[in-house]
Image (cartoon, helix red, strand yellow):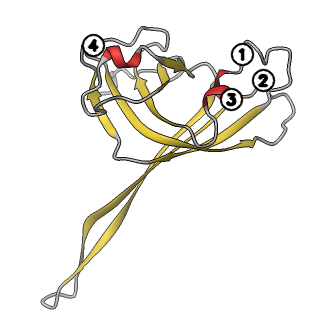
Amino acid sequence: MSDIPATPSDGNQLVLAVATFANMKAPKLTEATAQDDLSCYITSLDVGLDQATITDERLCTTDVFEQPGRKTHSLSVTAIDNTNSPDEAEFNLAVETLTEGAVMDILIRRGKAFDAPLAVGDTVRIYRIKVGAKVDVPHEANSTIKSMWKLFIISSPALDVVMAA
């Protein structure tokens, strides 16, 4: 079993900001054409899930059982920020797209080269979000200027759905 292949994550993630899908659980490729590709701006994509525990105590036992409870999905991104640089006008899409209060769908496709066109049959995750405030990432030596955004998830995400025509 040690010869099982693994897909590298570097270069194999696509992140699109899409206006909104009519139905996130049945996304259409045509709806993803009006989008912003943030893949090459994002330096860190933090997708999280916290699931609460429901305690299931019973009089007939000294054991305490558990049931899965509510889920809290979370999403935040860190991206290149070229504000005030000579590249601002042409290369600042993340800052221009992720404006505080904006509502959009974030589509994430993993396992295929980021520059491979989104296609019918691709498995994706879609999160409807409202953008939080832009926060400057502290200066580091030998680094680039970056900013971070918390993306507030405002509806149930569509996890591992297949792109349709």
Seen in the picture, residue 75 relative to 106 is either above or below; the reply is below
Q: From the top left corner, tell me how far across and down residue 43 is, in percent.
A: 64, 29
Residues under numbered marks 1 and 2 in contact, where contact means CB atoms less than 8 Å apart: yes
Q: Quadrant of the N terminus?
A: top left
Residue shown at the point (84%, 28%) measured from the top left: 142
Seen in the picture, residue 162 relative to 139 is either above or below; the reply is above
Residues under numbered marks 1 and 3 in contact, where contact means CB atoms less than 8 Å apart: no
| Badge 2 amino acid | Asn
Q: From the top left corner, tell me how far across and down residue 132 is, in percent.
A: 61, 46
Residues under numbered marks 3 and 2 in contact, where contact means CB atoms less than 8 Å apart: yes
The answer for how far apart the CA atoms under marks 4 and 3 are is 29 Å
Label 1: few (<14), some or many (≥20) within 10 Å? some
The answer for how far apart the CA atoms under marks 4 and 1 are is 29 Å
Label 3: few (<14), some or many (≥20) within 10 Å? many
The answer for how far apart the CA atoms under marks 2 and 4 are is 34 Å
| Badge 3 amino acid | Val
Name the residue that disc number 2 marks.
Answer: 82
Label 2: few (<14), some or many (≥20) within 10 Å? many
Residue 54 occupies quadrant: bottom left
| Badge 1 amino acid | Phe
Which of marks 2 and 3 precedes in the sequence? 2
Q: Secondary structure at mark 2?
A: loop
Which of marks 1 and 4 precedes in the sequence? 1
Which of marks 4 and 2 precedes in the sequence? 2
Give the foreground label among 4 and 3.
3
Name the residue that disc number 4 marks.
Answer: 120
| Badge 4 amino acid | Val
Name the residue that disc number 3 marks.
Answer: 95
Q: Which mark is residue 91?
A: 1
Q: From the top left corner, tell me how far across and down residue 45 is, in percent.
A: 55, 35
Q: From the top left corner, tell me how far across and down residue 149 is, in percent.
A: 63, 41
